[in-house]
Amino acid sequence: MLPIDQAGKMSDEELLVSSLENQDNFLYLIQRYKQKLFNFIKRITSVADEDAEDILQDVFLKVYLNLNDFNHGFKFSSWIYQIARNQVISNHRKLKARAEGYKTPLDEEMVRSLISGLDMEKLADAEILKLNIRKILKGLSEKYREVLILKFLEEKSYAEISDIIKKPIGTVGSLMNKAKSEFRKELEKQNIKLIV
Amino acid sequence: MLSLSRRTRNPENMIEDKNFDEKLLNSIKERKVAPKPRWHFILKEYAIWIAGAAFLIVSAVSFSLIIHMVRLFRFREFGFYQKAAHGPLEFLMLIIPVFWLIMLAVFVAIVYYDFKKTRKGYRYQPLAIIGAALVASAGLGIIFAGAGLGERIDDAIGKSAPEAFYKHVINPRIEFWSEPENGRLMGLVIFKRSDDEFGVLDIRKKEWLLYTEGSIGDREMIEVGRPVRAFGKAVSENEFRAEEILSFGPGRGFIMKMRPMPGTPDMMFGEPGQGMIIPGEEGGPKKFFYRAY
């Protein structure tokens, strides 16, 4: 197994190659991505922590099984997010039945990032928006919620989002515009006043 | 937009199981999970591309059949169809090869779906993929049509497809041209009585004597054992006077399958070129049928 400090300096792609050579090195990839993917799963679903961990386990198992499928023309992070997203979709029915309410892991800076990204600073009362952001996101349809989360909370570029959700970049752009428009409509629906 | 590095971690969002990583790795080891070999993914990718290419070829064949159905369509026939069709739908079915257009659409859709499954297929807009598939089908289809492939396939389908399906769905013109009472005769030339008199067996297996004296068109194409199409007038129950002989296009195979097979019992073979001779009923006139050499 690689020493920790050496593993820490390696890129994702280098760690992947070393995981194929030595199974134990896969631990470093797990450590690197477990929290990010856990948060991502929680953000796009409404499941309890235990269920999110179960999904996360399935994700890493799938990643390990398909290590030889990784194409070095892609970003590793896009690839692993894609697998996580697909796993969430394939567990969809099971997840819906055990949904316990929407608990997107959000912190102060994420919320500000989202408000800023949606050009909402001057249009809505920011404090109220922060308090209600989870409800607003829940009110959106899955395809819009997903792109907003990937863009503003996971900080993915349009190209990365295109690779994760497997749609053309142009479509990602259209989805983003519609998502912003739907976000504003949801604000109004939830009686969060827009400052004109 | 603020960067991730300044984000404060909310302890509520931490994974609860502190030994998650080790447990997962141990689980992988205990279950002897191993990465799928590289050749598995290479093979899968090749299979997708080969399937896509195969369906592209099939859609090109459909295109070549569209060309075949439309190519021999003459402007004069447009008038025939317009007059004789019982409505706009029937008219469209007569002039447009609807069946092959639907087949082309189906196969192009399959090519599109297949391409989306490739590694980078999702990066392209649907219209771009469909457009490219149509252009490729058209390009290949033109080459296939030039090589006579569309014609040969139509012949084969005409011979082997269920009769009702071919004449009502694939090639509705067969029925249209089999209305001698309305001046349109189509069938198989079964004998030659003189340079201007031919025996024709129509699709309902009724024999006609076709008179071609004074007619215009492709008279030199009339040959025993080949199909014929004539526009003119039925002058009696079994006689048709042609005003125009038209070249035979799609449906040749359908008509040709009416030829009796050699070796059919109770048939006697005549000299080559004379056709088959079978005794008439109760010693009546002999009948001639084309014999396959």
Image (cartoon, coloured by chain):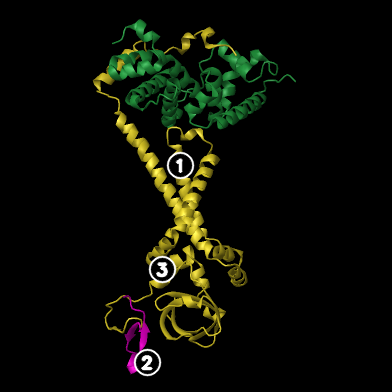
Amino acid type at mark 1: Tyr
What chain is tagged by disc 1? B
Q: Secondary structure at mark 3?
A: helix
Q: Work out whether B107 lies above or below B21.
A: below
Q: Position of residue A165 (x, y in %)?
A: 49, 29
Q: Which residues are magenta?
A: B274-293
Q: Earlier in the sequence, mark 1 or mark 2?
A: 1
Residue at x 35%, y 84% (from the top left corner): B274
Q: Work out whether B231 lies above or below A1.
A: below
Between B84 and B211, which is closer to the camera in this rendering? B211
The answer to whether residue A52 is magenta is no
Q: Which residue is mark 2?
A: B285
Q: Which residue is mark 3?
A: B253
Residue B6's image quarter? top right
Q: Work out whether B179 lies above or below B282.
A: above
Q: Which residue is mark 1?
A: B113
